Amino acid sequence: MISAKKENYLIEKMLSQSIMIDNTKEQKNDPSSIYIEEIIHFIYPDRVNALPLAESDAIFIWVSDRSAITSKMRNIAEWKNDKRNVHIINSTSEIIGMSGVNEYCINEETEGCLALGYLNSILNVERYMPFFIESTDQTFIAFKQSLRHYSADRVSRVSGLNEEMIIKLYKNIRCSSQSYHLLALNSRLTECAIQTARSICLIPSVDVNFGEASSVPILFYSSVIENEFGMKINQQDQWGVISKKIDYSYVGSKSSLLFNEEKQRRVLFYDWDFADYFDVDPLPSIKNMCESI
């Protein structure tokens, strides 16, 4: 659980960040956009850019903050009309109900459980092995083992989404030639919120198209997403996942030492540096979800 001292530090740090729009108006970032930026950099230490949305054929929008997506309805309609498959995973109390958009209504704060269920279906059920992972990688083995808690039937009980719809969602993610994940999450700084964002951000890592390019197919509501919707952002922030000047040279080092491995990983599934930074478990996990099933 995040300590009160750590939570206050992170909140103050996040709220102190800002971006410049049109070079005239300073606008505070949503706190969730700041910690999502940092989460992405921890997971993908050598990937610092977002893949252009134009390269996607399917867009998956994870919504826990209704206000974050309301003003973007027109843009979602444009994506749909541009022959992109649009899917909304909605954990708010209101159905969005857009024509031609696949909507999956789930229980509050269960997006992470759904995301980890997808990773389990790929890595344990299908037994897919990412080409950049060695079969002896102990951190990856531990990660795979932890995912067994998130079987389709257990995810169904927690999320409220029936197994048939879960399998349909997973198939749509898996079968897209280039899927894109847009996070419209609330800014509550809790362990569940951080692990939820982390779990969703890990989804592209098991995509068969996850190649060598230094980019990730993830956007989030606030700084980066506004650029996609036509607003002007400083060039230095354009498509930047990490725009702040922070030393991340230590990323991945502690876990490597614990497992007696001296190598830089392309994706960090199990990360003690992440755990220390956010005061959460080193493995992606939704503890209250596990305890309730």
Image (cartoon, grey):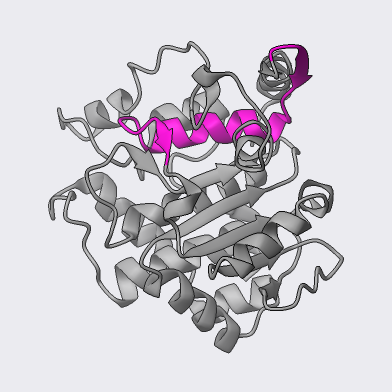
Q: Quadrant of residue 44?
A: top left
| Residue at image coords 77%, 20% | 27
Indicate the position of residue 113 as horizontal and vertical percent values: 57, 62
Q: Is residue 290 visible?
A: no
Q: Is residue 92 visible?
A: yes
Magenta residues span 23-50
Indicate the position of residue 35 as horizontal and vertical percent values: 60, 31
Q: Quadrant of residue 271?
A: top left
Residue 36 painted magenta? yes
Quadrant in which the C terminus is drawn: bottom right
Quadrant in which the N terminus is drawn: top right
| Residue at image coords 71%, 25% | 29
Q: Quadrant of residue 102?
A: bottom right
Give the side of residue 73 with respect to residue 276, left or right: right
| Residue at image coords 48%, 68% | 117
| Residue at image coords 52%, 61% | 115
Give the side of residue 52 with respect to residue 61, left or right: left
Q: Tell me: residue 162, above or below residue 55.
A: below
Residue 163 painted magenta? no
Indicate the position of residue 207 as horizontal and vertical percent values: 33, 60
Say which of 231 and 275 sits in front.
Answer: 231
Q: Tell me: residue 254, above or below residue 121.
A: above
Indicate the position of residue 8 as horizontal and vertical percent values: 74, 19
Q: How many marks?
A: 0
Say which of 157 and 181 sits in front.
Answer: 181
Q: Tell me: residue 267, above or below residue 110.
A: above
Say which of 218 and 6 sits in front.
Answer: 218
Furthest residue toward bottom: 164
